[in-house]
Amino acid sequence: MAIKDLPKEEYILPGSAACPGCPATIGLRIILKALGRNTIMVIPACCTAVIESWYPKTSFDIPILNIAFEASAAAASGIVSALKKLGREKTNVVVWAGDGGTYDIGLQAMSGAFERETDFIYICYNNQIYSNTGIQRSGATPYGAWTTTTVGGKKEVPKDMGAIVRAHHIPYVATASISYPEDLYRKVMKAKQIRGPKYIEILTPCPPGWRFSMDMTIEMGRLAVETGVWPLYEYENERMIFNGISKAIIEGKYKRKPVDEWLKLQGRFSHLFKPKRDEERIRRFQEYVDEMWERFKRMITPD
Ligand SMILES: Cc1ncc(C[n+]2csc(CCOP(=O)(O)OP(=O)(O)O)c2C)c(N)n1
Ligand code: SF4
Ligand SMILES: [Mg+2]
């Protein structure tokens, strides 16, 4: 499928309160084309809760439940139960939460909903920061990145959320990127057909948070995949399948670009290049990515 073949319906209307170049609205447009109108979305505190705009006006053309930061997956479980009582099981129940609301504050509720086998889709849009409250670090912030709470660069590596989610042995786990809309659309369409908990995590490069020019959002997402910083995969029936360039990487048909090519375009990493190149931290970043791909290789190699 090509991007021109995606459904023409739009559920994110003009007049949202997003920054220009916002990746969250790009992602929402794509996923809602796949989900369609028969969808109830749960959104905790995050940029998207602001993007919707303020009551009585809204730019979102589907029902939304805005809920406390830590409670989105629990609220989704409640909605799924209520719909079952009403005989409306065909309605898609979807959590759309940021990385702060997923890796950190909403993790317990998400784990509980996965364990209860709630029939819903949990989508994390990962901009690697708490952007709504002014660019603080989250459990998803990369090593070395500037945020307002990691002024000299983050000292720790991000959580391996993919591994945490896969450990719940739910039917479907996938990663995606707003820079590959057809891939994202296909994954949401697939998740819609599967019963039980589904998790999709979308990398969403944020211009003000990562400090790059707003016309570079798509390019920044592509480079994340081309450098191997962001892998595209699906985990289904306990099997890992890579997609697009990530498939070519794992099969040895595409050589990952050096991470510098992604890092140097973002102001949040500028201290790694100025006043002089910080060889040690750039090497550590590259090693982190190399080790992740080594782990993936071990996962797909039969014993
Ligand atoms: C329990 C709780 N702690 C803190 C906040 C303040 N808060 C609201 S949105 C937000 C950041 C959300 O970050 P993320 O989930 O990554 O979404 P983003 O803003 O990046 O879109 C924070 C810290 C809150 N609303 N509730
Ligand atoms: S801060 Fe980033 S994620 Fe939030 S509205 Fe602006 S561009 Fe979108
Ligand atoms: Mg965030």
Image (cartoon, rainbow, N blue to C red):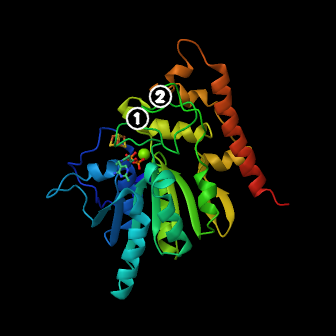
* Residue 42 falls in image quadrant: bottom left
Ligand 2's quadrant is top left
Q: In terms of depth relative to the viewer, which is nearer, 255 or 85?
A: 85
| Residue 244 drawn above or below residue 199 | above
Q: Residue at x 42, y 33 (%)?
A: 216
Q: In terms of depth relative to the viewer, which is nearer, 3 or 127?
A: 127
* Residue 276 falls in image quadrant: top right
State the image coordinates of residue 34 (x, y, percent, origin top left): 41, 64
Q: Residue at x 15, y 56 (%)?
A: 57
The C terminus - image quarter: bottom right
- Mark 1 belongs to which amino acid? Gly
Residue for badge 1: 209
Mark 2 near mark 1, Cβ–Cβ under 8 Å?
yes
- The dot on residue 108 is none
Does the closest atom of ligand 2 sit within 8 Å of the Cβ of label 1?
yes
- Mark 2 belongs to which amino acid? Arg
